[in-house]
Image: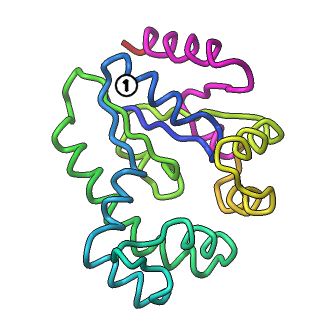
Amino acid sequence: MILGLTGNIGSGKSTVSNFLLDMGIKIFDADIIARDILNSEDVIKEVSNIFGNEFITIENIVDKKKLKAEVFTNKKKLEKLNSLIHPKVKLEFIKIRTKYIGKKEIIVFDIPLLFEVKLDKLCDLNVVVDIEPEIQIKRIKERDSLCEELICKIIESQMRREEKNKLADIVIENNGTIDELKYKVNEMIKNIK
């Protein structure tokens, strides 16, 4: 069974993913796959061509922090980056799905943009980790040390939480403690086994 796991920035999706990993469930993380793609030689060249050499470090890798600040303040640039990275990420998940389709083992596709890039269609069940906006902003500030303006731009660039929740098979609310979240994750796995 393939579980699609998503949630907007600061929702606790990565924490849920780590709980599942601790339970022995295989996790395929879109952020890690995208990072590896972003660090590939051909993509580094494309980023340099599209955005300029100032987004490539002396070590000849993409300056992700600088690129993030650039694309989340310019919708057209975000679309350009997404059109470069998303098809390659999607192809990787299709390959993984082919390998695991029909197996009893639970695996997780941890994909922040699960619905936006239509990868939910590759999953048997889709899980959204949801959080109230005030708590979300507070947690992101504490975790990433980003200014509230950039946080809001990132949140605005993502699918609205109400839309994600409607598309989900399972919604895990994460406005409480870490122990409450862990309990909810354990119950979810018990119920789908």
Front one among 20 and 58: 58
Residue 69, compared with residue 176, is above or below; it is: below
Residue at the extreme left of the image, as rendered: 99
Dot 1 crowding, Cα within 10 Å, few <14, some 14–19, many 20+: some
Q: Quadrant of the C terminus?
A: top left
- What's the coloring here? rainbow
Residue 19 position, x and y percent, is 46, 22
* Left or right of residue 147: residue 91: left
* Left or right of residue 51: residue 164: right
Residue 13, compared with residue 20, is above or below; it is: below
**In the rendered structure, does residue 178 fall within the stretch colored magenta?**
yes
Q: Quadrant of the N terminus?
A: top left
Front one among 62 and 58: 58
Residue type, mark 1 in image: Leu
Residue 148 position, x and y percent, is 80, 56
User: In the rendered image, which residue does mark 1 sit on?
Assistant: 21
Determine the secondary structure under disc 1.
Answer: helix
Residue visible at 38% across and 59% down? 35
Residue visible at 26% across and 52% down? 94
Corner quadrant of residue 133: top right
**In the rendered structure, does residue 42 fall within the stretch colored magenta?**
no
* Left or right of residue 78: residue 140: right
Corner quadrant of residue 65: bottom right
Residue visible at 67% across and 62% down? 157
Q: Main secondary structure of the magenta part?
A: helix
Residue visible at 53% across and 30% down? 15
Which region shows up in magenta? 163-191
Residue 166 position, x and y percent, is 65, 39
